[in-house]
Image: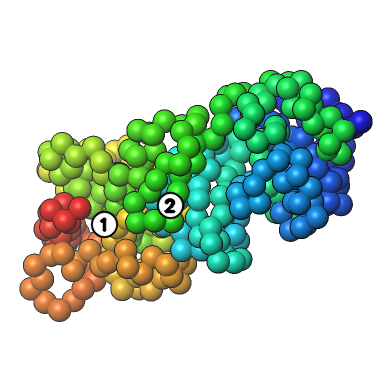
Amino acid sequence: MTKVAKINPVSPDQKVIEEAAGVLREGGLVIIPTETVYGIAANMLNKKTLSRLYEIKKRPKDKPFSLHIDRKERIEEFCRAIPVCAYKLIDKFWPGPLTLILKSAREAGTIGIRMPDDDIALKIIGSAEIPVVSPSANISGGKPPVKFSEAIKELDGLVDFAIDAGDTKLGVESTIVDLTKETPQILRSGAIRKEDIEAIIKKKIVLFICTGNSCRSVMAEALLKKKMKEKKRDDVEVLSAGLMMMGGLGATEATKEVLSREGIDVSSHISQGVTKELIKKSDFILVMEKLQERKILTLAPEAKNRLFLLKEFAKMKDNQLDIADPVGRNLEFYEDTLNIIKEAVEKVSELI
């Protein structure tokens, strides 16, 4: 018979987690909970284990198992040519009931991957320190189990270890989205609605970057948000960040002053630092200086075709592509800076 361990989903016993992880490392099969349904976890790199898993599930060998990961950033270990829309979906729905089909980084073809929203599953995957697949804990064609009793009924004696964590939170399988083609395709409807997936993919994200996220990028963000509101565009998200800012400060007083003359209140603005996650999910990245452009490319080279100097979109009266930092300058300099940014943002609003 399969060894069964009951576990508290709110405060899981670390000894049970470690035991399950050890069984996986040794090539065993483990029934684990996720927020969707119970799954059979297995070491993706162990061919004998995978062969056994296919046999138990009576699943065709040409139908691969999806990989489960414990951290968002691990997607880049297993996938390549990851599109911007994948990062948007990850930012919105991971951890959660969304499986993405992407190009595999380790071999030709594709791979299904998701990060479950279940503390027990995440702890086991992290502790195992191996790539873990986890198809639903049922014979192919049957109903995926949402209760432990349903999973063990079919698989008792066929797997090595099983964790009883009660009923799953959602009780519905993950939604599967194929992002390997030009147009994303929903291959399986699940816990996340089709319209919610499509809304996230459709939305364009514009990211303005300056040094401290207290003046130039704040101006650009505020002006573009105003434009989008005037155009009744709810399919554009506008963000700003700073390369030298850890976050938490507000806009400069002069920035507040010049924007107030445009009917814009940025008194509630809180600065944030640039992150790889922000860059990866943005469709358009607009910086103020060439130095910032170089730093962004160092941080995320894949952003090259989405990265622009904001002044490229203004009617320049000189060959200078940088928009100078107004910090420490007088109000007139802030006004001139705002006018350059306003002209560029107007053009950007017509292009997105």
Residue 7, by quadrant, is top right
Residue 308 percent coordinates (x, y): 27, 66
Helix, strand or loop at disc 1?
Answer: helix
| Rendered image: mark on residue 50 | none
Q: Secondary structure at mark 2?
A: loop
Relative to the observer, which residue lies in front, 86 or 31? 31
Count of numbered circles on the image: 2
Disc 1, disc 2: CB below 8 Å?
no
Instruction: Give above or below for 79 relative to 120.
Output: below
Point out the image quarter for the N terminus: top right
Q: Which residue is mark 2?
A: 179
* Residue 171, quarter of the rendered image: top right
Q: Residue furthest bottom?
A: 319
Q: Which residue is mark 1?
A: 216
Is residue 140 placed above or below 346 in the rendered structure? above
Q: Earlier in the sequence, mark 1 or mark 2?
A: 2
